[in-house]
Image: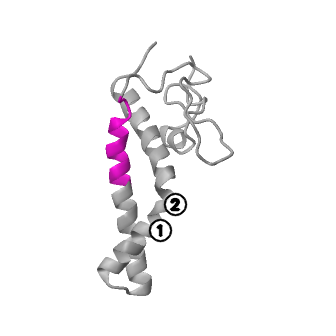
Amino acid sequence: MQRADVSAVRGILRQLCPRCRSGKIFRKSVWLFPRMYERCPACGLKFEREDGYFLGAMYIGYGLGIAVIAILAALVWAVLRWPLMKSVAAGIVLFVPLAPVLTWMARVLWIYLDQGVDPDRS
């Protein structure tokens, strides 16, 4: 299978398969909660290799979430000069709508990381 001429960063941002970089990882959804394909529509790569496969994505999502909350809290503090705890609380509230996006991104990052370390050649 020929890999599309797409960089890894662009593939991650566009949520493309790490092997062929042309097939989508997520299906489109009317309700903005896309579901994952079981396999890549273009090359057939199985995205969830085993039960509990996305446990590692949880750690990536946690790290991303903490970083985003810290950035949002710092922005609230810098702009409004609220006390630190109030700024952190505002950062958490502002983060809630972004949580699904970070969950999808964490899954994509985990798939790319896993394929980079242990490529599935099937």
Would residue 14 be counted in the magenta stretch? no
> Decide: marks 1, 2 in contact (CB < 8 A)?
yes
Q: Give the image location of residue 46, x and y in percent.
A: 49, 21
Is 84 left or right of 24, judged from the image as shown? left
- Magenta stretch: helix, strand or loop mostly: helix
Would residue 58 be counted in the magenta stretch? yes
* 97 vs 47: above or below: below
Secondary structure under badge 1? helix
Most distant residue in the top direction: 122
Residue displayed at 44% across by 68% down = 93
Secondary structure under badge 2? helix
Residue displayed at 35% across by 30% down = 52
* 76 vs 1: above or below: below
> Disc 1 versus disc 2: distance between alpha carbons?
7 Å
Q: Give the image location of residue 65, x and y in percent.
A: 38, 56
Q: Locate residue 117: give its quadrant.
A: top left
Give the magenta-colored segment's residue range.
Answer: 52-64
Q: Amino acid at mark 1?
A: Leu
Q: Amino acid at mark 2?
A: Pro
**How many marks overall?**
2
Q: Visible in this render: residue 105?
A: yes
The image's mark for residue 97 is: 2
* 16 vs 2: above or below: below
Q: Nearer the viewer, residue 34 or 75?
A: 34
Q: Locate residue 48: give its quadrant.
A: top left
Residue displayed at 40% across by 67% down = 92
Mark 1, residue position: 94
